[in-house]
Image: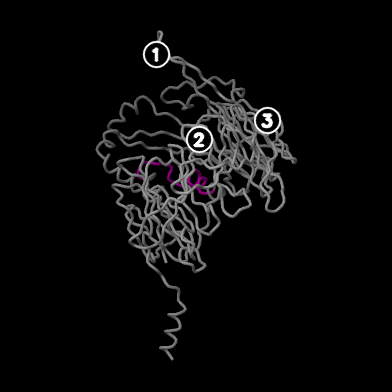
Amino acid sequence: MKLLLTIALACAAPLIGQARVAGKYELTGVTSQRLADTDGDGKQELILVHKDGGVASLFRIGFDADNKQFDRRGYIPLQDPTHTLVAIADLLPAAGEEVILATPKHTACMPWQGPSTTTPARPIVLARRARFRVRVDEPRLSPFVIDLNSDGLLDLMVPSLANVQPFFQEETGEGSAPAFRRTNPVTVPVSITVGTGGGGLDQEMSGGISIPQIETEDLNADSRPDILTSEGFTRSYHIQRQDGTFAEPIIVDLTQFVDSTPKAIMELGTTAVFNDKQLMRRGDLNADGIADHVIAHRRKIWTFLGDGGGPQFKKSRTQAVADDITELMLIDLDEDKRDDLLTFRVQLPGIGAILLGLVQSVDIDVRAVAYPSVEDGFARTPKWRRTVTIRVPPLLSLLSRQEELIDRFTNLINKARVSARGEFQSTGQSDLAIVQQDLSSIDLFSAVEKAPELNTQEGGRMLGSLLFEDENTIFDIDRVFGLASGFLDRLSDQSVGDRTPTTSLKLRDAESWLLTDLLVGELNGEEGQELLAIYRSVSDTSLRAYDVISWR
């Protein structure tokens, strides 16, 4: 009976396979990569965008130990690589994802050509008026195909010289090609510079175009993404209406917010103001889900509460603080789900301390003052205040300890280990892969529950405790290393604790190859997923390596 029970348990237990490298590929000139199923067969391919203007789709032949190579499945040559945006998305009725190209002519899907084909494929035009005419340094994957209006359909957001043009996908019959509706463009400030060089008759004209940073975020809690552009000290907010059009932009020039208080003189023993610039932060001050904004300059703070129309910068609540503000944060310190105002004043050491800095420590005082959120902004008086000291070791001591400090810093970086989660063994449970600190191998743990993520509320509580409750107010170099190391250790313990890896696999030599990323995908079409380890050559920064890791 005991023997039968043992056999039954053994048969019921999941088989734990060995991890192995099942496919390898190396090449130069890659700008970006992604895993995607381009033909809908359940197998994901490795999509590579090349500097020389091509998009390649690769797949593995198999897991045979003697056949660890990728084959090129298809190749799409770009006609104008310096004026092309590339995206991978599922827009056509046929199964699988497609390559989407935004060019000066149109935005189109490009079908895959065979491995030996060099002639361009005939494009399937999606939107003729969706033209991209901006020069890029090199082609790469870009996030211009997104769901802009949260209707479950992918839309286009194509940047131009002076605007971003949205195209909304419309509902069509099942099996029909997608149709796109152009809406009003979102104007963005573009900087154009022209100069001359060389001198005399041989001088040459040169120029450049700078497009501002573009973000999408729901700023008024209506479940529709809005567009935010930033250029220098100018912020432009484009709120999306219910019909998909965008309202006239809400523009704020930060340089208009000036505290008339005399500027603090940058002298030793005074507050460090760092270029006397305006500071702007975004948060939720009244827990309504709508973005609020705080602007600070010197000793004055402007608070603007957003509403259903988005951010507004006309009606403000102003208040003054006692010290020049070096930096500020919006963070929930008292766990009421409303962001509080945390300000920092950095006090420079005196001339005497600086002169003695060669042989003794230098103390830099940082005064932290926090104001709790109230109905229309922040309390007039602070609830939390404390001065902490950053102790900089003597310069001669740092020079004598440089090898030790480099080693400690390297070990700290290595603690932030690359990891990936997936179902590698077809057990229906989540497995975890963690790269060892010395980058020599990868540890695989079976059936690991996902650790709770550190949210902003927990982050605020940790920071508040460290600044305002901890008895030790001195932060020297050893304590900083210790806090960072302890935090990373805690993150690791939350994942696997003291568990022993189920199996391990040796990675490429870390002295020759730098591991840059781990991707998870279904590359073989069988049950279970694979890991794709991506490396960069140490001696040749243009060389990339891709290893498929199977664990069954």
- Residue topped by disc 1: 198
Viewer-side label of 3, 1? 1
Instruction: Give neighbour class at mark 1: few <14, some 14-19, many 20+ (Cα, 10 Å).
Output: few
Query: Which residue has dot 2 on it?
Result: 79
Query: Residue 266: x percent and y percent?
Result: 45, 22
Q: Is residue 470 magenta?
A: yes
Tell me: 294 left or right of 548. right
Left or right position of 402 against 475: left
Q: Mark 3 points at which residue?
A: 250
| Disc nearer the start of the sequence (2/1) | 2
Determine whether 505 is above or below 279 in the image: below
Residue at image point 56% right, 48% down: 98
- Between the C-alphas of marks 3 and 2, the distance is 38 Å
Can the viewer see residue 534?
A: yes
The amino acid beneath tag 3 is Ile
SS category of the residue bearing label 3: strand
Which residue is at the front of the view, 37 or 13? 37
Marks 3/1 in contact by CB < 8 Å: the verdict is no
* Dot 3 or dot 1, earlier in sequence: 1
Magenta stretch in the rendered image:
461-478
